[in-house]
Image: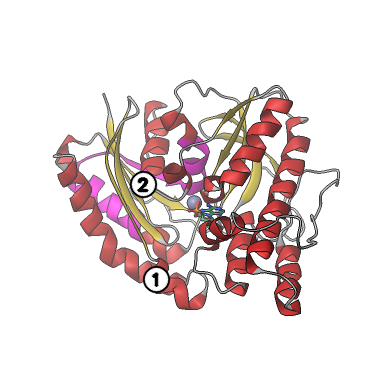
Amino acid sequence: MTVILGLESSCDDSAVALVTSDRRVLAQAVVGQNSAHQPYGGVVPEIAARAHVEILPGLIAKVLDDAKMSIREVDAVAATAGPGLIGGVMVALLAGKGLALAAGKPLIAVNHLEGHALSPRLVDPDLHFPYLLLLVSGGHCQLLEVRGVGDYRRLATTIDDAAGEAFDKAAKLLGLPYPGGPAIEQLARHGDGTAVPLPRPLVGSAEPHFSFAGLKSSVQRAVASGSYRAEDIAASLQQAIVDCLVDRTRLALDKTDAPTLVVAGGVAANQAIRGALAELASANGRAFSVPPAWLCTDNGAMIAWAGMERFTAGTSDALDVPARARWPLDESAEKVRGAGVKA
Ligand code: KG4
Ligand code: ZN
């Protein structure tokens, strides 16, 4: 049995976990910084980086302690090396390098997106390659054919905002706390998803790309009009995002024979989105897999698990491996006009 320590600090969550090759999470801890970023309605990179410096070392100590393990009993150290807010990325990566160096263990520099992409395999031993992945988070909205560890074909991406950003920006307009996704989902339970007419950007277009920036201006107009209840705006926004994700994913399903549809990333914690994609998979004769909500939002277990997959495949990294703000899973994918501004 192999044990890997995973470290994550690429956005606003400091996270650490110990994961085994037989898919057990021995211990884990996540500390978010919501209250620190709350007044700004979004993550402030400088504040996030400084907070990781303060929080991450204590989490490493706690997780090792909870598992009653010493760093010497760990087989390898996996740390997110990008993409993300570079100041934050450097914290976990350098902590990982320090631990690997001091304990004489291999270092595995993990792509945060690969962490999300492989996370469903931590809890679903029957999920085999290839699968079609809808990766939806605060920074990314992509459709990828996952062919194997380190082997990705991007079928689509967003030309502007990610789905999570649409939730976060709308929440800010509605005076809801950051991050907006969970707050909008909660409010939407008491609202009518057909009450506010909102656009479905790119729905029906020939390539399965996404666009969410226009939704923000429409929500802004709906709020300013004073004609709608916040519950109805929240429900209508959630419905518009569901409709976009389903339409685009349906198109991508036609472009791959992969037998399983998988959804991962923070936005995959949303029940309405999970339900709609499960229905889409079943209507198209595909299996469906989605990790539990705790594994969808940023966490250390997905980084430890991606490290495990790479370690099992025989790879590790040198101590001079760089931190990367930008690190696409499919390096050969063409740039889509308007895309690529977000890490
Ligand atoms: O994967 P993640 O934790 O961090 C990134 O790598 O971006 O995703 C965070 C995003 C935020 O935009 C947040 O609003 C969204 O995921 N999110 C949700 C839900 N929980 C988190 N969006 C919709 N519904 C949710 N329940
Ligand atoms: Zn993430």
Q: Which one is nearer the viewer's eye here, 185 or 201?
A: 185
Q: Is residue 267 above or below residue 175?
A: above
Label 1 C-beta lies within 8 Å of the nearest ligand 1 atom: no
Q: Quadrant of the N terminus?
A: top left
Relative horizontal placement of residue 173, taking residue 182 as reference (left or right): right
Q: Name which of mark 1 and mark 2 comes first in the sequence.
A: 1
Q: Residues within 10 Å of mark 1 (few under 14, many from 20)?
A: few
Residue pictured at 73% horizontal, 51% vertical: 210
Q: Which residue is mark 2?
A: 300
- Which residue is found at the position 67% from the left and 60% from the top? 161
| Residue 268 highlighted magenta (yes or no) | no
5, above or below 221, in the image: above
Horizontal and vertical percent position of residue 120: 48, 34
The magenta segment is 91-119
- The amino acid marked with disc number 2 is Gly
Determine the residue positioned at 38% across, 68% down: 49
Residue at mark 1 = 35
Locate residue 122 relative to residue 140 in the image: left or right.
left
Image marks 1 and 2: residues in contact by CB distance under 8 Å: no
The answer to whether residue 238 is seen in the rendering is yes
